[in-house]
Amino acid sequence: MHDALYERGLRVLAFPCNQFGQQEPGTAAEIRKFADSYGAQFAMFAKVLVNGADAHPVFRFLRAKLPDVLGSSIKWNFTKFLTDADGQPVKRFSPATSPLSIRPAIEALLDQPPKEASL
């Protein structure tokens, strides 16, 4: 999906996190190598914390803007956040949600005309 929608503006950003059952114990290079073995072409950032007092500011922002039914914390790896071209959060998807199943939501957002810059 990243490759198919890249030219239309899709950017997938991955933030590894080891806060969930120690699923990401490796170094940044090891995690990238693993993703590359599956043909991943998206941006991969350094490992971050997504919950707690030391959570990365990106995740504090996303959690505050898009809490889920059980609160704002992230419950498990692979929670997905969809943002618009300006970085404003639009929708949050559970870890169980297949990335391919959110393609219609992504395409609808990509089809929206750009917002005019305010003066």
Image: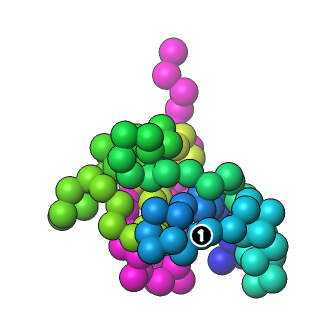
45 relative position to 33: left or right: left
Q: Is residue 3 above or below residue 68?
A: below
Q: Residue at x 53, y 32 (%)?
A: 116
Q: Residue at x 60, y 62 (%)?
A: 16
11 relative position to 107: left or right: right
Q: Is residue 19 above or below residue 48?
A: below
Q: Which residue is mark 1?
A: 24
Q: Residue at x 27, y 53 (%)?
A: 72
Confirm whether residue 104 shows in the render: no
* Residue range of the region highlighted in magenta in the rendering: 91-119
Q: How many marks?
A: 1
94 or 31: which is nearer to us? 31
Q: Residue furthest top?
A: 119
**Three-letter amino acid code at the position of disc 1:** Glu
Q: Residues within 10 Å of mark 1 (few under 14, many from 20)?
A: some
Res. 31 image quadrant: bottom right
Res. 34 image quadrant: bottom right
102 or 55: which is nearer to us? 55
Question: Residue 75 location in percent, x, y?
Answer: 33, 67
Magenta segment includes 9: no
Question: Residue 24 location in percent, x, y?
Answer: 59, 70
Confirm whether residue 82 shows in the render: yes
Question: Residue 10 location in percent, x, y?
Answer: 64, 61
* Secondary structure state at the residue bearing disc 1: loop
Q: Residue at x 66, y 77 (%)?
A: 1
Question: Residue 37 location in percent, x, y?
Answer: 81, 83
70 or 7: which is nearer to us? 70
